[in-house]
Image (tube, helix red, strand yellow):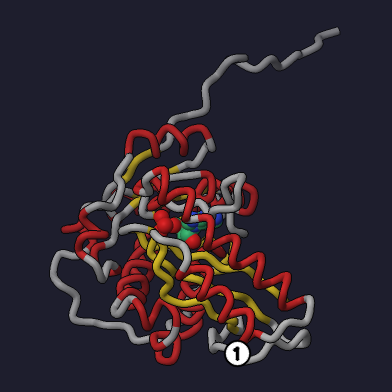
Amino acid sequence: MNINIHLPLFTHAKPSPVQVVHTGADWNKYWLDSLKSNKTIGLVPTMGALHEGHLDLVRQAKSDTDIVVVSIFVNPTQFNNQEDFDNYPITIKEDLAKLEQEAADFVFIPKTETIYPEKPLLSINFGELETVLEGAFRPGHFNGVGLIVSKLFNCIKPHVAFFGQKDLQQTGIIRSLVNDLSFDIKLVIVPTRREEDGLAMSSRNVRLSAEERSQSLILFNSLTKAKEELLAGKSWFEVQDQIKCDFEETSLARLEYFELIHPEVFTSYSEFDMGQKSAICVAAYVGKTRLIDNLPIIP
Ligand code: AMP
């Protein structure tokens, strides 16, 4: 009797290296192959300097789709502050090693001239969303986000795109982009990954000095404190007032906003209501670094 035993050829085979592509034309060759084999494509847009929060998105994409493309592009049009853009951390070598570890399939790293051969004439206005929270404090930011995400969608042509809840208002912007421009793309929102002490992971955290890092905890601590007090029946007016005082007493922190909002339309509530969807959003400078965070109260 003939018994065929199929042993793996390489018992210690390394995962195949992540494939780097720089242009849409390069990607199109792989895209055509994926179409022929009926594979689903997942896109994780990032600006690099990857941390565990980004990698959670990659892991989610790996479990939901067949081919995972991570884009790394520090998008100039979404920065309303030149210093922030100039100091944005770039760690491509480390990023590639982390993506290889997660078995991402492709990394799209375009050049600025490829994405913006000319200054775009188009500008995207997201209406009411532009006038509140990040929209109000970072004029032009969401136009830049809308431009780059549209370009990435057109270039990579994903079936599913993955975004972090850390940038809550951005998820609203992308939802509106997909609906208003009829992109046939499913959106998946991944929960915020935090450091052990609660600070939301962010590429900008590396810029914090030791003292700033310790004071940056005021963002998460004020969110959790406000949530507890609201659920215990305190009025939003009192809660917000107390948090503003807490920020004033934190020497290196400067509060921009601390708002109780509807997590889909982003309008501010003046009172807390157990029957309404709600989240608290915060933005503050700690030293020269601007940080944002949010916490769902009634999802
Ligand atoms: P960025 O590189 O900062 O533009 O972020 C790329 C994507 O990662 C966005 O969808 C972010 O919302 C998401 N992201 C950033 N930080 C976190 C985090 N701490 N937890 C989960 N997702 C995150």
Residue pictured at 29% horizontal, 56% vertical = 74
Q: In the rendering, at what x and y percent does residue 157 appear?
A: 43, 63
Residue at the farthest top position = 1
Q: Position of residue 185 (x, y in %)?
A: 52, 69
Which quadrant of the view contains residue 284?
bottom left
Residue 209 lies, in percent from the top left, at: 37, 45
The N terminus sits in image quarter: top right
Residue ranking furthest to the left: 118
180 relative to 169, above or below: below
> What residue appears at the point 53 percent right and 63 percent down from the top-left corner?
219
Residue with the mark numbered 1: 269
Of residues 1 and 293, the one nearer the viewer is 293
Q: Position of residue 102 (x, y in %)?
A: 54, 37
Does residue 45 appear in the picture of this structure?
no
Residue at x-position 81% and y-position 9% = 2
Image side of residue 103 versus residue 225, left or right: left
As rendered, which of 266 and 23 lies closer to the eye? 266
Near-viewer residue (65 or 187): 187
Kindly identify the residue that appears in the image at 44 percent across and 80 percent down: 133
SS of the residue at dot 1?
A: loop
Type of amino acid at the residue the image marks with label 1? Tyr
Would residue 113 be found to the left or right of residue 73 on screen?
left
Question: Is 2 placed left or right of 244 in the picture?
Answer: right
Crowding around mark 1 (Cα neighbors within 10 Å: few <14, some 14 to 19, many 20+) is some
Q: Quadrant of residue 143?
A: bottom left
> Which image quadrant is residue 156 in?
bottom left
